[in-house]
């Protein structure tokens, strides 16, 4: 069985009190409790404070371009069906720059797990508004307030029939750990949007602000009821639900492609002569 020590990476370079610490602790505890060994797991990220995540976990990692987390994660998963692939991104990285990739990843239902650190701000570049910033919120770049309507990731996920859509909160580590385990265990594309206070640049959505609003979704709630899921996804303001919003059991993408269904690339033979010919042709 793996231990937390097995996953110990570099010392995080986040602000003291950052919500990312709660996410990191919940994440490591979840994968250890699931018995996942570091060599069985790949984590992919883009750019941003959330993009630093792979540096703080000792496993297979890929730190790529801004907004391009999901294409890389998709390629890894299609190449190796036995590899657990997790994508980590911030709200700007995923819902802004990478929004196009998110839409099609949900459509395809690739068996990748996406964890979005949603602090409603661009933290790495010092406080610009993101797609999930509240309308009217003032920032350094938006002194007159945000004019665009706030993006609702959960409503988008339900509309696109996302296989697993959930919302967690970085200040509730025990509940968040359980959601991470559910997202990983689900067969299909999983989106876990994690509400995360940014103590430096977001003075609105603070720990106190969330503490007064978040509540655990009722045990009797049925996440497979799409109509009820839409209603739950649209809740925002005085009451914010955290938990599994919606899920279904659609076939996964990699099992529907005949050429790799039973023989993914990692199992296919490597032809050295053919590879040498290709290299000569291009180089």
Image: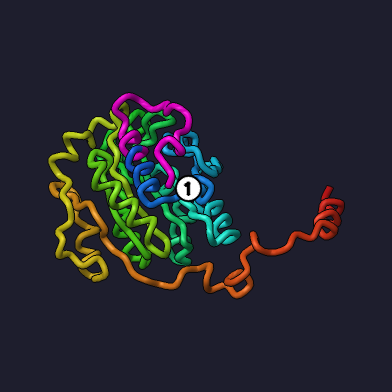
Q: Is residue 157 magenta?
A: no
User: Would residue 202 be found to the left or right of residue 100 on screen?
Assistant: left
Q: Using the rendered image of the protein, determine whether residue 243 is visible from the camera's viewpoint.
A: yes
Q: Is residue 133 depicted above or below 261 in this figure? A: above
Compared to 125, does 96 lie above or below? below
> Does 125 sit above or below residue 211?
above
In the structure shown, which secondary structural element does the residue marked by tag 1 occupy? loop
Q: Nearer the viewer, residue 138 or 259?
A: 259
Is residue 48 at least partly visible in the picture? no
Q: Residue at x 53, y 59 (%)?
A: 82
Q: Percent position (x, y) of residue 257?
A: 57, 72
At 60% across and 75% down in the image, what residue appears? 258
254 lies left or right of 4: right
Nearest to the observer: residue 202 or residue 244? 244
Q: Is residue 265 left or right of residue 32?
A: right
Q: Position of residue 180 (x, y in %)?
A: 34, 51
In which image quadrant can residue 138 be found? top left
Residue farthest to the top? 16
* Residues drawn in magenta: 1-24
In the rendering, at what x and y percent does residue 34 appear?
38, 52
Give the crowd class for mark 1: few <14, some 14-19, many >=20 residues within 10 Å. some
Of 36 and 85, which appears nearest the observer?
Answer: 36
Residue appearing at x 61%, y 69% in the figure:
260
Q: Position of residue 265 (x, y in %)?
A: 65, 62
Q: Which residue is mark 1?
A: 37
Position of 222 compared to 71: left or right?
left
Colour approach in the figure:
rainbow
In this rendered view, identify the residue nearer to me: 137 or 27: 27
Residue 16 drawn in magenta? yes
């Amino acid at each position: 069985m793996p231990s937390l020590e097995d996953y110990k990476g570099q010392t995080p370079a986040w602000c003291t009190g950052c919500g990312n610490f709660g996410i990191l602790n919940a994440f490591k505890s979840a994968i250890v409790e699931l018995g996942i060994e570091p060599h069985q797991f790949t984590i992919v990220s883009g750019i941003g404070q959330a993009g630093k995540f792979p540096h703080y976990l000792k496993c297979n990692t890929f730190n790529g371009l801004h907004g391009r987390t999901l294409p890389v994660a998709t390629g890894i998963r299609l190449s190796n069906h036995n590899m657990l692939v997790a994508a980590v991104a911030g709200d700007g990285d995923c819902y802004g720059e990478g929004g196009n990739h998110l839409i099609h990843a949900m459509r395809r239902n690739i068996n990748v797990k996406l964890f979005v650190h949603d602090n409603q701000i661009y933290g790495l570049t010092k406080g610009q508004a993101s797609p999930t910033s509240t309308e009217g919120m003032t920032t350094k770049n938006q002194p007159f307030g945000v004019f665009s309507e706030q993006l609702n990731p959960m409503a988008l996920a339900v509309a696109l029939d996302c296989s697993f859509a959930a919302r967690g909160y970085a200040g509730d580590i025990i509940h968040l750990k359980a959601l991470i385990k559910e997202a990983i265990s689900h067969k299909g594309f999983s989106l876990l949007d994690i509400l995360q206070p940014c103590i430096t640049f977001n003075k609105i959505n603070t720990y106190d602000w969330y503490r007064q609003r978040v509540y655990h979704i009722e045990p009797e709630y049925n996440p497979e009821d799409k109509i009820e899921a839409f209603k739950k996804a649209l809740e925002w303001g005085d009451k914010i639900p955290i938990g599994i919003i919606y899920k279904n059991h659609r076939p996964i993408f990699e099992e529907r492609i005949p050429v790799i269904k039973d023989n993914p690339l990692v199992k296919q033979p490597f032809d050295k002569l053919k590879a040498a010919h290709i290299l000569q042709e291009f180089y």
